[in-house]
Image (cartoon, rainbow, N blue to C red):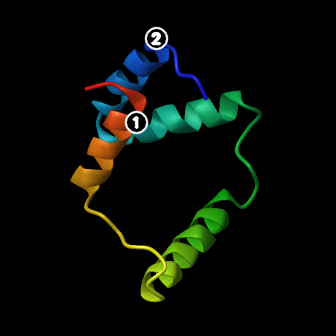
Amino acid sequence: MSVTSAAKKILEDALALSEEERESLANALLTSLGGMPQDVEQAWADEAVRRLEREARGETKAIPWEEAKRQIRERFGFE
């Protein structure tokens, strides 16, 4: 997926928002794509359980949030 410089700037600005503002923005973006899927909370809960189970089995390893943010910024080319 190619990300334009405008999209990178929007993402950078969005990540600087408070958690509450990011949540509102994410909900607005999801709604603009056709509405929130049914059972979205259950889907996220199921995914969290799957990830925890994979980590418990040693199939994956969690990383600190600061490292995850660094990797995201590096991958998408913004600071």
The CA span between labels 2 and 1 is: 16 Å
- Tell me the crowding category of disc 2: few under 14, some 14 to 19, or many 20 or more residues within 10 angstroms, Cα based: few
Which residue does the image show at 42% across and 20% down from the upper left? 8
Residue under circle 1?
Answer: 75
Q: Is residue 73 above or below residue 54?
A: above
Which quarter of the image is occupied by the N terminus?
A: top right
**Label 2 SS:** helix
**Label 1 SS:** helix
Residue under circle 2?
Answer: 6
| Residue kind at label 1, given as amino acid type | Arg
Residue 28: x %, y % from top left:
58, 31
Q: Is residue 30 above or below residue 51?
A: above
| Residue kind at label 2, given as amino acid type | Ala
Examine the image and state in which quarter residue 41 appears: bottom right
Disc assigned to residue 66: none
Q: Are marks 2 and 1 in contact (CB under 8 Å)?
A: no
Residue 64: x %, y % from top left:
25, 61
